[in-house]
Image (cartoon, helix red, strand yellow):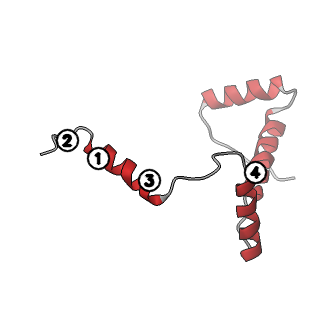
């Protein structure tokens, strides 16, 4: 088994030790678990391999709850123009 040395502020070490003890773990075990958790979350976000992956992603997005329909582009432009006009003297 490899040994790894870390350099960190005492305040961080104290916080990590406290949390590890709360979870019934040693600092070493807690740091390993945190590293494994981070690796797992990073691996979950994968790149699209092909067009089918991309289409599946957009199908999942369409299934999410939200507004039924986005405003059309002309409506967006009107809102932008109204926003620009606020605070101006109009001259």
**What residue sits right under mark 1 in the picture?**
84
Q: Are marks 3 and 1 in contact (CB under 8 Å)?
A: no
Q: CA distance from mark 3 to mark 2?
A: 21 Å
N-terminal-most mark, 4 or 2: 4
Rendered residue at 61%/27% (across/down): 11
Pick whichever, 55 or 8, lies toward us: 55
Pick whichever, 89 or 35, lies toward us: 89
Residue 75 is labelled as: 3
**What residue sits right under mark 4 in the picture?**
41
Point out residue 25 in the picture as x, y percentages from the top left corner: 86, 31
Q: Are marks 2 and 1 in contact (CB under 8 Å)?
A: yes
* Occupied quadrant, residue 49: bottom right
Q: Is residue 14 left or right of residue 20?
A: left
Q: Is residue 25 left or right of residue 34?
A: right
* Badge count: 4
**What residue sits right under mark 2 in the picture?**
88
Up the image or down, 4 lies above or below 46; here it is above
Q: Is residue 61 visible?
A: yes
Up the image or down, 90 lies above or below 70; here it is above
Point out residue 65 in the picture as x, y percentages from the top left corner: 71, 45
Q: Nearer the viewer, mark 1 or mark 4?
A: 1
Up the image or down, 49 lies above or below 11; here it is below
N-terminal-most mark, 3 or 1: 3
N-terminal-most mark, 3 or 2: 3
Q: CA distance from mark 4 to mark 2?
A: 48 Å
Instruction: Estimate how packed mark 2 is, as few (under 14), some (14 to 19) or many (20 or more) residues with alpha carbons within 10 Å.
Output: few
Q: CA distance from mark 1 to mark 4?
A: 41 Å
Point out residue 26 in the picture as x, y percentages from the top left corner: 84, 32
Q: Is residue 8 left or right of residue 16?
A: left
């Amino acid at each position: 088994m490899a040994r790894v040395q870390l350099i960190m502020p005492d305040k961080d070490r104290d916080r990590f030790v406290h949390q590890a003890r709360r979870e019934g773990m040693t600092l070493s075990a807690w740091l390993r678990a945190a590293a494994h958790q981070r690796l797992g979350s990073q691996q979950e976000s994968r790149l699209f391999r092909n067009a089918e992956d991309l289409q599946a992603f957009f199908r999942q997005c369409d299934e999410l709850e939200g507004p039924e329909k986005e405003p059309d582009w002309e409506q967006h432009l009107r809102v932008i123009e109204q926003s620009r006009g606020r605070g101006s003297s109009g001259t």
